Amino acid sequence: MQVELIELSEKRIRFLLKGVTPAFANAIRRASLSEVPTLAVDEINIYDNTSVLFDEQMALRLGLIPIQAEDLDLYVLRDECECGGAGCPACQMTMMLSAEGPCTVHSGDIRFEDPGVKVAYENIPIVILGEGEKLVVEGMITLDKGSTHAKWQGGTRCGYKNLSEITIGECDGCGRCVEVCPRDVLEMDGGRVKVTDPMSCNLCKLCVKECNAEAIEVVPIADTFVMVIVTDGSISARDLVAGAAKDIGDRAGLLGQKLGELA
């Protein structure tokens, strides 16, 4: 297996994955969506809410706000905590939100017990409070996985596609294939068609259908995939992919252990 980095930012990563099966590429995608732990508001106590939103709507909005931690390793899953899930500083922390109108309450107004924890985006609107309206909320932040609930899902747009192999034969230079390509993969160069960016090709094969000379061939490379992983901001793209790979490795190791016990 080979990995070739194409693009990396805090919230998005794109890379080539070579020498693997579609099942493995899909495992990276699925693990990025559901198996990498993140922080989220789990339980709340609403002491005062005279806004236009019902308590249930308020709880939903707070739960879906992405939350970052300087060191996520300081927290453990509640099911794996030494407290047995009863709640302790290792598996949960408190948050507070207090506001009085008229104002718009944003995610940046949330205060956390741990100074190393903050919201990923401070300008997410929660509710508009009118004159005299109040909101006082206390909540618990816990670590969990997207497989438990979508609010712990760190990956948002996670997908893959086969890398395309585009071959140009005897080209008559008509340029119609360049015009119909939706991804600008092709361009004219000295009266001939040239491939500029095969990684952007989505295998639509419009160029093949448009070429009267039948000079273009587009085929997927069976064991090479372009992976794109985007996060909600609660975890960096690098850490999300690394966590997904670790989860797959741990599961494979556990399976090997169980099979060994049966042998």
Image (tube, rainbow, N blue to C red):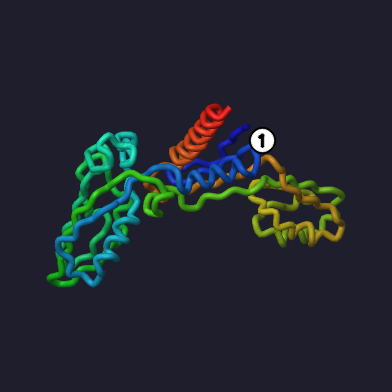
Residue at the far front in the pictured view: 262
Q: Position of residue 54 (x, y in %)?
A: 25, 69
Query: Which of 222/144 is in front?
Result: 144
* Residue for point 46% across, 47% down: 34
Give x and y (percent) for residue 99.
Answer: 16, 61
Q: Is residue 105 above or below residue 168?
A: below
Residue under circle 1? 19
Residue type pointed to by label 1: Gly
| Badge count | 1
**Residue at image x 66%, y 59%?**
182
Task: Give me the residue at 27% from left, 42% from top.
Answer: 85
Image side of residue 30 versus residue 172, left or right: left
Instruction: State the residue at coordinates (29%, 53%).
Output: 122
Picture quadrant of residue 107 = bottom left
In screen coordinates, is 144 left or right of 193? left
* Quarter of the figure that contains the N terminus: top right
**Position above or below: 38 against 180:** above
Which of the 4 image quadrants contains residue 82? top left
- Residue most toward the left? 132
The answer to whether residue 57 is above or below residue 138 is below
**Residue 13: image x %, image y %?**
51, 43
